[in-house]
Image (spheres, rainbow, N blue to C red):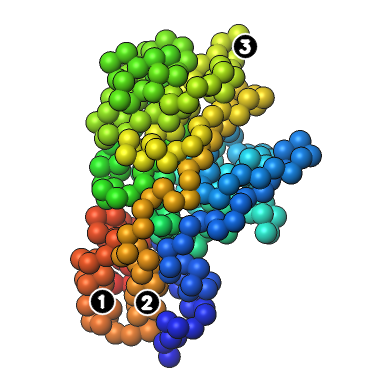
């Protein structure tokens, strides 16, 4: 017997939630498209309780490895009040998903590796896991997590090949990332976070609409590719748009060497909603970079407020009614609502694909 959409909870869809949505929890919390937080967020740094305004905090961090330090990473994300974190060089083989940390303060990790030497992942705060709509594992250098807030938020964690790697490998990485950005809907909030292994330089110098003029170091060819990618997709390099002392710009330290190679890119039209981008000093080698975005930055499209309720209802149809009725509902949903252009029905493992075949 199907559950009523008016009931407070909906049935959990069985199966591996890695590639798709797990529909569980109060309908009201997911269906209305409310902000991720309606109150201020608290954390603890050096024994002091701190508080930041409501909104989103994204982070990116080359962790060196997650083996033996996953709990340490989660603790640092909690201290820094990060909601969604892109991780690079996790050095885990294969792909998968798991919760990390103690219940009540956990993060869910989706990752994609290869031979245990690189790999990328995305960690999402436990309270936000039910808002994850889709996960796309492009390669061991790029993974995408799509989250539903007021609008669709497309989070891309990228780990670009190092300068010494072959040009073909670099081309594949940038093609993967460029394709993913290009697939995003016009109203999506797209954010690329990662270790891009390039130096964009201290000033704009030909890329004034992309580079904010507050960078670090001397531009190299890999940094030019970062700027070209951003320019091609009307994005900006968030790190360079805020007046910062060098300690807040430097993201990598090795001996006496200092550089900025970890970046956060957003669409230029959303830059006005980004209130802060900075590196967190005091970490070994790679520093975490965080970005704060206001809670009202993404507009209030009326269709967004019902999209997740529609999606939940469709998932219940897939579970409880005939294939023909579910197919009819899916076609209507796909053509009329916010998932237009953002859902790949051919992606292996997506919940919709699985229940439609």
Answer left or right for 183 relative to 30.
left
249 up-or-down from 270: above or below: above
350 up-or-down from 230: above or below: below
236 or 93: which is nearer to us?
236
Pick the quarter of the image with the N terminus. bottom left
Would you say residue 98 is visible in this rendering?
no
Crowd rating for badge 1 (residues with CA inside 10 Å; few <14, some 14–19, many 20+): some
Mark 2 and mark 1: Cα distance apart in space: 9 Å
Which residue corresponds to the image point at 67% horizontal and 24% vertical from the top-left?
A: 282
Q: Residue furthest bottom?
A: 1
On residue 313, which mark appears? 2
The secondary structure type at the circle numbered 2 is helix
Crowd rating for badge 3 (residues with CA inside 10 Å; few <14, some 14–19, many 20+): few
Mark 3 and mark 2: Cα distance apart in space: 56 Å
Residue topped by disc 3: 255
Q: Residue 219: percent from the left, percent from the top? A: 38, 13
Dividing the picture into quadrants, the one containing residue 192 is top left
């Amino acid at each position: 017997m199907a559950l009523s959409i008016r009931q407070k909870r909906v049935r959990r869809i069985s199966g591996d939630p890695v590639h798709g949505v797990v529909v569980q929890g109060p309908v009201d919390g997911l269906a209305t498209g409310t902000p991720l937080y309606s109150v201020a967020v608290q954390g603890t740094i050096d024994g002091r309780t701190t508080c930041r305004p409501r909104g989103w905090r994204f982070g990116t961090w080359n962790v060196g490895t997650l083996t033996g330090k996953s709990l340490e990473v989660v603790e640092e994300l909690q201290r820094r009040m990060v909601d969604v974190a892109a991780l690079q060089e996790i050095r885990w083989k294969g792909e998968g998903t798991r919760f990390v940390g103690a219940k009540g303060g956990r993060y869910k990790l989706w990752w994609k590796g290869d031979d245990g030497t690189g790999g990328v992942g995305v960690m999402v705060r436990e309270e936000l896991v039910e808002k994850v709509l889709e996960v796309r594992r492009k390669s061991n250098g790029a993974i995408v997590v799509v989250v539903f807030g007021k609008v669709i938020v497309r989070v891309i964690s990228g780990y670009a090949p190092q300068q010494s790697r072959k040009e073909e490998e670099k081309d594949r990485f940038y093609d993967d990332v460029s394709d993913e950005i290009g697939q995003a809907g016009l109203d999506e909030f797209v954010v690329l976070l990662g270790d891009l292994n390039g130096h964009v330089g201290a000033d704009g110098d030909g890329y004034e609409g992309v580079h904010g003029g507050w960078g670090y170091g001397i531009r190299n060819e890999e940094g030019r590719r970062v700027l070209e990618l951003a320019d091609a997709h009307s994005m900006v390099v968030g790190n360079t748009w805020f007046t910062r002392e060098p300690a807040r710009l430097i993201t990598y330290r090795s001996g006496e060497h200092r550089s900025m190679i970890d970046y956060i890119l957003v669409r230029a039209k959303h830059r006005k909603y980004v209130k802060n981008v900075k590196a967190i000093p005091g970490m070994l080698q790679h520093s975490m970079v965080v970005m704060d975005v206001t809670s009202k930055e993404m507009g209030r499209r009326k269709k967004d407020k019902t999209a997740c309720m529609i999606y939940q209802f469709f998932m219940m149809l897939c579970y409880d009614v005939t294939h023909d009725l579910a197919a009819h509902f899916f076609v209507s949903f796909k053509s009329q609502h916010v998932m237009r252009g953002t859902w790949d029905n051919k992606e292996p493992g997506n919940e919709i694909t699985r229940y439609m075949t």
